[in-house]
Amino acid sequence: MNISFRPPLLQDLESIMEIERASFTVDEAASEKAMKERISIIKDSFLVAVNNDDQPIGYVVGPIIQERYLYDELFEKTSLNPPSGGYQSILSLAVAPEYRQLKVGGKLLKQLILQCKEQQRTGITLTCLEPLIPFYKKHGFSLEGLSASQHANVPWFNMVLELKRNE
């Protein structure tokens, strides 16, 4: 199976929400309204992995922010991205359960890193739960301690990947 990447389309919303709900708890998952806003407003920092039939099988999304670490308001409100600079945040990286053994998450991260370099971003920032720290470390992220985030009332950890210019 070939996996390709593209920006999201509004008709992907239902599939994306199915993946979101299968990947996160009810408290952690984005609302349909929030995801629809992300598709409409920040499609330049939203990548969808699709199968041979152009059906979404995973995605990574987040706005560009000036801060090094995520803050909880990002999960509620979406604003336009600056054309260059800033940190690419990751609010969600999710893969449909039946595709998780195909390393789609890692492929999405690699594609996002390439896109961020093209857009001259400073780096990529995210928060994750403790069991996911090794996954992100394997992809070059550094653990920078416990996050101040109270999202879903669980402990999150700050992870950052600095991007070098001219690579």
Image (cartoon, rainbow, N blue to C red):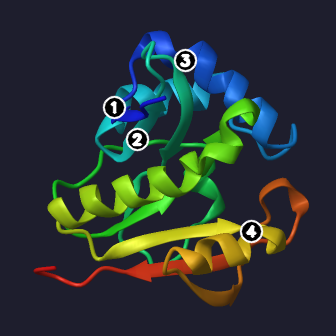
Which element is circle 2 on? strand
Residue 132 is marked as: 4
Q: Are marks 2 and 1 in contact (CB under 8 Å)?
A: yes
Which element is circle 1 on? loop
Q: Residue at point 24% right, 84% down?
A: 164
Does residue 166 appear to the left or right of 2 in the view shown? left
Q: Which residue is mark 3?
A: 13
Q: Are marks 1 and 4 in contact (CB under 8 Å)?
A: no
Q: Tell me the CA gap for discs 2 and 1.
A: 6 Å
Q: Which residue is mark 2?
A: 46
Q: Quadrant of the C terminus?
A: bottom left
Residue 70 is marked as: none
In front: mark 4 or mark 2?
A: 4
Q: Tell me the CA gap for discs 4 and 3.
A: 25 Å
In front: mark 4 or mark 3?
A: 4
Q: Tell me the CA gap for discs 3 and 1.
A: 12 Å
Total of numbered circles in the picture? 4
Residue 10, quarter of the rendered image: top left
Q: Residue at point 43% right, 19% down?
A: 52
User: Considering only order in the chain, which callout, 1 or 3, is on the residue closer to the N terminus?
Assistant: 1
Q: Tell me the CA gap for discs 1 and 4.
A: 25 Å
